[in-house]
Amino acid sequence: MSKSGKEKSQRLEELRAEIQHHDELYYRQTQPEISDQQYDQKKRELDNLQAELDPLGLFAATEQGEEQDAKPDVGDDRLEAFTSHRHLQPMLSLDNTYDEKEFFEFDQRLQRIFGTGDLTYVVEPKIDGVAISLTYQHGKLITATTRGNGVEGDIVTQNILHIKGLPQFLPGSSFPELIEIRGEIFMSHQEFECINKEREKNNLPLYANPRNLAAGTVKLLDPKEARQRKLEIVLYGLGFCQPQTFFTTLSEFHQTLIDWQVPALEYFRRVSHAQDAWNSIMELDHLRHGYGYPTDGAVIKLDSFAHHAEAGSTAKSPRWAIAYKFETENQETTLEAIHLQVGRTGTITPVAWLSPVQLAGTQVSRASLHNADEIARKDIRVGDRVIVEKAGEIIPQVVEVVHSQRPSESTPFSFPKTCPSCETSLERMEGEAAWKCPNLNCSEQVKGRIRYFASRGCMDIDHLGEAVVEQLVDQGLVTRSSALYQLTKDQALSLEGFAEKSADNLIRSIEKSKQRELWRLICALGIKHVGAAAAKDLARTFRSLNNLANASLDQLIAIDGIGEVMALSVKGFFENPENQTLLADFVSLGISPELEIDESNGAPWVGKTFVLTGTLTSMTRDEAGARIEALGGKSASSVSKRTDYLVAGSGAGSKLLKAEKLGISVIDETGFVKLLEDPNSA
Ligand code: IVH
C-alpha cells in the first residue's frame, strides 16, 4: 500500500532528524552508530522523498547555520575550541553509487553535457579517512584545515605536523604561488590495534575503528597527545590554485605529486572510455587490499580541469566525479550466544557473540542483530554458522544464516520478555521494531544516560570514562546526571583505581562543566530527536532551561528547524515528573546557564530570522551570524516564509531567487552593516 501525503511528510521529518543525529555522531563526536551503507540508504530515501514532496525545493530544510548555495551537504566537523579557516575553494562531497548501471549513467550524463563520447577519466581509490586541506603559499605549508562545513573548517596544523611525509615545503622552485592540496588522513590497522590493546590493558573503552580514531586524533585539543598516535596522510586532490592554469589535467597533478615525492596515490589510471574505467574499478578492487591506507571504493573523475569547470557542481557534489563503493567484505563464523544490550533510552539491542574472525583487517567477535523481528525473520539461532559483514568498517552485522550447516538439535531463539539488567517486563510500542525497558531507573539506562551527558558533544566532562560511570552507578553514588555535581572527593577516592590526583581531576572536571553553554546542557538531557543543532536552536530561542521547560507546543513548532515530531518529544520530556526533578536539581546545584544576549539595546532582533548567503567582505558568515544572535535574532540556513531578511553577499545564488519568489526583504552587505549599526531600524 502506498503511503499517504501525511505519512510521507512524517517520514521526511523523521529521516531529517535521524540524519542530523548521525551527522553529529559521525562528524563532531567521531562515534558513528551506523555503517556508511546504512547512512547512504537513509540519505537516498530522504532525497527521493524530498524530490517527490517539494520538487521546486521551496520548503527544503537544511541544518541551522548551514549555507546551501555555497555550503554543500557535507555535515560539519567544526568544534568551538578550534580556529576556523575559510577554504579558498569549497570542499565538496561525492555522489555515491553501489551500482554498475548508475556508473554508466554518470558517463552518459557527461557525454550529453560535452556532446562527445570521447571523455578521458581518471580512476583512483577512495580512501576511508579524514579529509584535510593543506594550503601552501610560496611553497610553504600555511595551514592544515578539516573539511568543516565545506566552506570553512578547523585549523588542525599542530595536530598533524608530526605526520611522517607531510610536506612542510614543496620541493624545488616550480610550484603554484598559492595552492590548496586535498588529502586524507588515516591510521593503519596495526597502529589502531596497538592503541586499543593498550587501552584494554588500562580498562579503558576501545575505539570503534581506525577512521574514528584518526578523526578524533586530528581534533585533539592537545597536540602533544596527538603526536603520540601515528597518523598517516595521502594526497590526491587540487583545491584552489594560483595561477589557475598551473595544472591542466588531474593525471598531471597526480604525477606532479609523485615527482615532488610527497605521499601520493599508489594507483591512478587514465582511461578514455567508460568501459575501460569500469575495468580499472574492478582491477582496483583487487589491488586495494595491498595498499597502506583503507579504501572503500573507487573515484572516477574527468581528467581535464577545464572539463571540471564546465560540468560544474550541484549543491552537494561535482558533476565531473562519482564514487563507486565496493561491496563490503564478509566472513563465515559461529554464533556462540545472543546477549541483550540496554541503551540509554531503554532500547534493547540483541548482540551476537561470535567465534572471533578476521574481517576487513580487524578481529571481529561481536555483531549487531538489530532487533527481535530481524532475528525471527532470518531465524537466527545460537550455534548457527552465520555470514558477518563489516559495512564501512563500523559495527559488523550478521547478514545471513548458512542453513545447510545448522546443527540438528538447534531451537529457535526466544527473545526474552524481561530486561536483562533490571528484570522489568519489556514493552514494545505499536509499529516499532525495538523492545524497550520502561524502567527509567534501570541501571544500564542510567549508565547510558550519564555516559551521554558527559560525552564530548554534550557536557564534555573529562576523566569520566565508561569504567568510572559503571562504578558510580553500581555503587549507588550517581542515580541521575545531576548527582554528578554532588559527588565528593571522598566518594571519588572510594572508586577502584582512584588516588588523590585522579579524584581531584574527576571532581575538577565535573565542576568545570557547570560553566558549559546552555545548548550543551539541552543536548546532554538526551531528549529523543534533539541533537546539537536542534539544541542550539532551542537555546537561541528560549535562552534558559526554565523557559524551554515551559514552552508550549505551538512555540516549539514555530521554530524554524523544529518539526512536530521533535516538538512533541521536547514537550513530553519536560512533562515527565522524573525529568522535572532533574531540572530542579540543576537549578539548586547552581547549573542554570542562560544564553547571553546583548540587552543593552533591548535585544531588538528577538523573533527576527536572517538568512546569510553569498560571500561577505567585511566579516565571515559565522561572525555575521554571531552578531545577529547577540542582538537576539536568529541566523537560519534556508529561506522560508518565516525569513525576515535575506542578506545577499556577492555571488548569491538560489537562495536569492527563492527569497525573491517568496517576497522576502533582500539586503546587501552595506544594508546589513547599516542595520547592525542601527538595529532598531530592522
Ligand atoms: S574527491 C570535489 N577523491 O571522500 C571532490 N575524495 O565523499 C571531492 N575521498 O570529502 C573529493 N578518497 O574526504 C576525492 N580519491 C578521492 C577520495 C576522496 C577519499 C573522501 C574525501 C571527500 C569524500 C567525499
Image (cartoon, grey):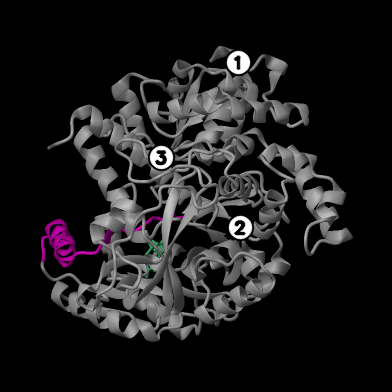
Q: Residue at x 55, y 53 (%)?
A: 29
In front: label 3 or label 1: 3
In front: label 2 or label 3: 3
Rounded to the nearest angstrom, the CA distance separating label 2 from label 1 is 34 Å
Q: Which residues are magenta?
A: 87-116
Mark 2 is surrounded, within 10 Å at the Cα level, by few (under 14), some (14 to 19) or many (20 or more) other residues, namely many
Residue 428 colored magenta?
A: no
Q: Which residue is mark 3?
A: 427
Quadrant housing residue 228: bottom right
Residue 354 drawn at (x, y percent): 41, 73
In this view, the residue in front, 100 or 545, is 545
Residue 573 drawn at (x, y percent): 52, 29
In this view, the residue in front, 135 or 539, is 539
Which label was assigned to residue 155?
2
Q: Which residue is mark 1?
A: 604
The answer to whether the residue labelled 2 contacts the one labelled 3, judged by CB atoms less than 8 Å apart, is: no
Which label was assigned to residue 128?
none
Q: Earlier in the sequence, mark 3 or mark 1?
A: 3
SS class, disc 2: loop
Quadrant housing residue 580: top right
Residue 103 colored magenta?
A: yes
SS class, disc 1: loop
Q: Residue at x 56, y 20 (%)?
A: 675
Q: Residue at x 68, y 52 (%)?
A: 474
Q: Earlier in the sequence, mark 2 or mark 3?
A: 2
Q: Earlier in the sequence, mark 2 or mark 1?
A: 2
